[in-house]
Every structure is written in C-alpha cells, then in structure tokens.
Amino acid sequence: MKFIKITLAAVCLAVFCLHKVNAQEISEKSSNVKQDSLVSETLQTIILSATFLKDSGTIAPTTMITKDEISQFSPVDLVDVVNQTPGVYIQSGAINTNRITIRGVGSRTLFGTNKIRAYFNGIPITNGAGETSIDSYNTSDIGYFEIVKGPKATQFGTNLGGTLLLSTKKPEADGLSLQNNFTVGSFGLFKHTTNLAIEDENLSVLYSYDHLESKGFRENNAYYRNSYLLAIKSTLDDNFSIGFLLQHFNTFAHIASSLSREDFEEDPAQAAFTWGQAKGFEDNNSITAGFNLESKISSSISNTTSIYYSYLDSYEPRPFNILDQFTNGYGVRSVFTKDYFNRNGTTTINLGTEWNQDIYNWETIENLYEINNGFGSLEGEMLSDNKEKRTSVNVFGTVNFSLTPKLKTEIGLNVNKTNYQYSDLFTQGPENRSANRDFETIFAPNFNLVYALNNQFTFFGNVSRGFNYPSVEETLTPDGIINPEIAPEKGWNYEMGSKTSFFKNKLNVELSGYLLSIQDLLVAERVGDDQFIGRNAGKTEHKGLELSVNYKNSISKNIKIDIYVNTEFSAHKFIDFVDGDNDFSGNDLTGVPDKKITAGLRFYHENGLYANTNYQYIGSQPITDDNSLFSDSYQVVNVQTGFKKEIYKYLTAIISAGINNITNEKYASSILINATSFGNTAPRYFYPGEPLNFYTSLKVNYVF
C-alpha cells in the first residue's frame, strides 16, 4: 500500500505542475495549431486518426474493425471477423468456448482467454484474474473494435498478448430511430435484436435488446442468450460531458467438450461421453455498469475519469464436480492529458491510474450424475468453499512528441502492483489453506517511433515490456492449496514495419516483423480429468511476419470493389523448457498454427445490391509439447449477399443471406493441447468446427 500511495501522490503532483504551467500560457494559442497525427493518412483498413487515437493512446499502428466489416460475417459472434486480422487467432470450440491468441500469446490457456486485456467503452471487461470473454457481446452493438498487438498500449495494462478496445456504435441518424434485426439459420439458429437510438447535438442514447439461441450441431450443444445494453452520453457544456453504460446478459450453454481423434473422425456431432452423461452446462448472469466523465480543465488540459462495477454469477456442472461461483468487481480509472504546441507539432503528456478489485467466491460440489438415472448432474456433498480478493493498481504515463515534422516518438511507462488474498472457508484448524500472494512490482516501459517519409510511406518501430499474471486455476492446486512459487510471466517485444499506399490510397500495404521473448512461461500441467495445475516453466520466443494488402476501387460508374489479403507466418519456439525428465527446448510452441492466410472480395452496386466472400486457411499446429502430434491444416470459405433498399425517406430495409463453410470442410476449430488419457479413454484433443450451414437476416430501420 505504501507503493500505491507514493505513485498516486506522484500522479497528483505531476498533474498539479501541468496545470500551473498551463496557467501561464496564452489561451488563444491552442485552437488553430494542433496538427493531425503523422500516420492519419495511411491504411484505410487501419484507422489512426485523432478520433481513434484516444482509445489505445498509442502512435503505433493498430487494427480497427468497423461495424461495416462486422456486418460482412455471420451475426452470431465476432470470431470470423477478428480472425481476418493477421497475428490474431480465435480458436472457437463453441459460441461460449473461445480462446484468443495474439502472436502466439495465450495459446497455452486451455479454456477461455487470459493473456490480453479488454475494455468496453473504456470500462475494463477483463476480470481480476486476467480472464476475458467476448462471446456475450452482441455484434449489432459494436461500432468499432480496436486491436493492439503486443504490450504497446501503456495506458491499458501492457499485457503480453495485447489489448482489445470495444465501443458501442453511434446512432446512424439524428433524431429518434428504431431498428429491428431478425436472423434464422441452420441448427435452430434464431437471433432477434432491437435497437432504439436518440441522437442530437448534446445527447446520444442507445438501447439494445438481443436474444440469441441455437441448438448447435453437436449433442449437448444448445446455447441461449438474452442481453440488454444502455449507453448514454450527454454533453453538458463546452467543457463537460458525462456517459453511462449498463449491460446485462444471461447465457445458458450446454457443453459438448472436446473429442478424441477416433470420435472426431467417426462422428464430430457427438458430445464427450462424460460431459454428455452429466449433461454439463454453464449458466451465467452478468452486469456491467459504469459512469464516465470527460472534462476540459483548460484549453490544453483534459481529464477522463470512469468508475465501474461488475457482477458475474455462474453455475457450471462438470463431470468431475460442480462449480458455483460469483464475482463482484469494482474499479476507477482516471487519465489526465496535457498538450504543448511547438513548431514540429503537438507534444502530448498522459498521466493516469487504474485501480481494480475483484472479490471472487466459489464452491465446488460433488457431482452424482452417475447415479442420477440418466437425468444429468446432481449435487452431492460440498468439496470446497473459497474466497479470493484480487487487487491491482496500474500507474502509467506516456509522452508523445515530434522530433522533426516527420519523426514522431512515444515514450511510456506502466507500473503495476497486484495482490491476491485467498481464504479457505471450508477447512478448519491447522489444515486451513488461507494465504496471501503479494506479487513484486512490475515496471513495463514502452518506446514507439513513427517516421512518415511522405503521405505514402510510413515506417514504425516498437520496443516494449509486458507481463501476464497467473489465473486462479494457476495460483491454486486442485486441492485448493495456494502455489507460493507461481510468478507472472514477463517479456520484451521488438517490432518493425512499414505502411505504404499507392494509386491515391486505393492500394494499401502494411508489413511488420516482430520478436517477443517471454520468460517464466505459465504452463498448465494436467493432473486429472479436465483438472490442471499451473507453474512457471522456461522461456519462449515468438517470431513472425505479417502482411496486409487492401485494394479499393470503382470498376464502373455503379460498382465498387474491395479486395484484401492478410497473411502471417510464425516461428514460435520453446527456448528453455524442461518438464520433469522431458526437455522440450527447441520445439515448436504448442497450439499455434505456423501460418494463417485470409482473403476477401466484396462488390457494391449503387442500387443497394452487394455480395462478398471470405477465405481462411489455418496451418498445422503442434498439439503436444514433444511435437509428436500435429493438427491438420484446413481452409474455410464463407459467402454472403444482400440488398439494401430505401422504401421511403424514413424507412430502410436490408435483406441478406450467407453460407458458412460452403465446401463442408471437416476440421477442428479449437485444440486442447497436451490432453492425456485416463482409464480406458483416449486423449480428447479436438473441438469440431461447424459443417456447412446457412443464415438469412432481415434488418428494418425507421427514423422518426
């Protein structure tokens, strides 16, 4: 706590000094001398303008996925559209089972995502253990989605994987508008979204209700979700605006789990035997709420402050036990920004802090499904009762300045302090396992350099440090004993690249190469049926090349085309990894494809007709640390067509239809690495991908 008080005091002192300096400036100096970012005229598919720069707070190139790009894919989830991004790969075992890896980071997380940090309208949606879930977010609510690859976003935690920044869409028209969207499709798919929006000069309101259900193509694979979203932003005057976010969702998802190779090849639609017998599922209720205040303190100083609360209640019967858990999360985030103006451009200083605390409560209960006469899970005796308070403080600062009119620099530092306090509420006396874990303070510097040769050629480089804390499962053994030896994994990121444009920005090319060196790698050692223990084991090196090419043009007076090709080639290796008597040093990193290629083609006609197709190739990936088993490569093709018609001035309708996996490719959409056999059962490595399926949607938008 002493460290926290000192760092917070330092931030307050720095802000006070900035304010005193500003009081001596001439206020008229500020309005006309701000210059656009050096990189604002580059790739059209990657937006780096002042509008979006405030989200990630970095001058380094980031990937921006817009609502128009999201609409080109299935409305069920964000998996396919995100997977078009080079360096980013979502393995999806089901709608509710996703693992996001960025440049190989996160590949060793067995279930879910915990190596990145994510925000929704500036509010953290990553919990205190570093876990992030995006399956509950309605695609129709997302306005844009920024992806920062690697620990380059100093203002957002510098996780080794990177940062995801989601924002709600803005109303499409001034005044009051109502939008209804209906989707039906294969495997009992039904989705209904209603949006009510208000937009005027000083007020923006978005209310959204969404219902999604699917029976799934596998046994014990049904999914149901209801979600509500309210986003409000009000401009009080020229200096103050206030925002409010409230989101609630309930999901009920059966779990089919992974299959052995024999079962996968014989019948991918079946559920894992024990999960089918237990009729395993997860039932989640979640609330996220937050206030945001943006204030202009003076002509060159501004502040953005958010306070937020989150609640998650989850009940999950599994074959080996029943997990009953709930989490209360609280936090505050505040960032001060100061601008200085000089002949080379604007120097911007950001100072801020983010404090988060989660109180995680969980019980495990005996599952008596084997004696429940085929009716699935049945509660038995309590096995454990636990509570963990997880507190994290980030204090950060960045300075963006121009060395010359063409050369811009960003220097940043993030300082993190994290503490876990575990309480064993089940065991009494000397066998009680309550313990605290106070991790060492981590310092994560960041250095970005952007050189704009001219409006067509930009070069960039980055050196940054990042970290990932262990999850709850990694800090505790299956018996609930805290692991005093577990430590965060830490690493350095090195990156260089260029962005070029040709033919009046019709053709845009981005090329980047990176090296990410990680020490104290967190690995999961399997010790039972779907039970694991985490430990630090060695060092990895992540190396890769990424290339994005985008071409937009009009091929006639009435028709426009958009073509893109994104590729990545990776060589991720264990540098130092000894597991017991096994030395895996030099082997390929488990769970990461060696290459990924995506491509797309889209036609637009001015009469409202459009069509697009996208292609995805995923290379082979090692399944086991000894590299004795690899998954098969696969390729998937999706198509979509639609027609937009303005029925009359205030009423617009869009009808669309799509086919996913049009070639009916049989593939594993997610891999469970290092699975082992128990008893007479074979290792269950594979989550089957969906076979050929279709959907059709009708969207009606009325502006009052």
Image (cartoon, rainbow, N blue to C red):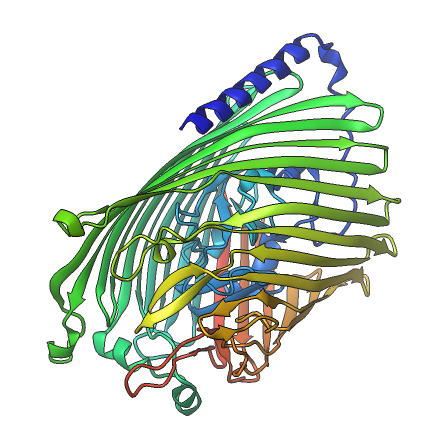
Left or right of 584 on screen, residue 259: left
Where residue 382 sits in the image (x, y, percent)?
Answer: 13, 59
Quick one: which residue is furthest to the front in this view? 581
For the point 36% across and 54% down, the residue is 475
Corner quadrant of residue 264: bottom left
Q: Is residue 117 above or below residue 583?
A: above
* Image quarter of the N terminus: top left
Where residue 596 sits in the image (x, y, percent)?
Answer: 64, 71
Quick one: which residue is furthest to the top in this view? 24
Q: Is residue 404 above or below residue 568?
A: above
Left or right of 543 on screen, residue 625: left
For the point 55% across and 17% down, the residue is 13
Q: Nearer the viewer, residue 313 or 684?
A: 684
The answer to whether residue 32 is seen in the rendering is no
Where residue 523 sits in the image (x, y, percent)?
Answer: 45, 63
Corner quadrant of residue 398: top right
Where residue 616 sits in the image (x, y, percent)?
Answer: 62, 73
Left or right of 144 on screen, residue 677: left
Q: Is residue 219 above or below residue 596?
A: below
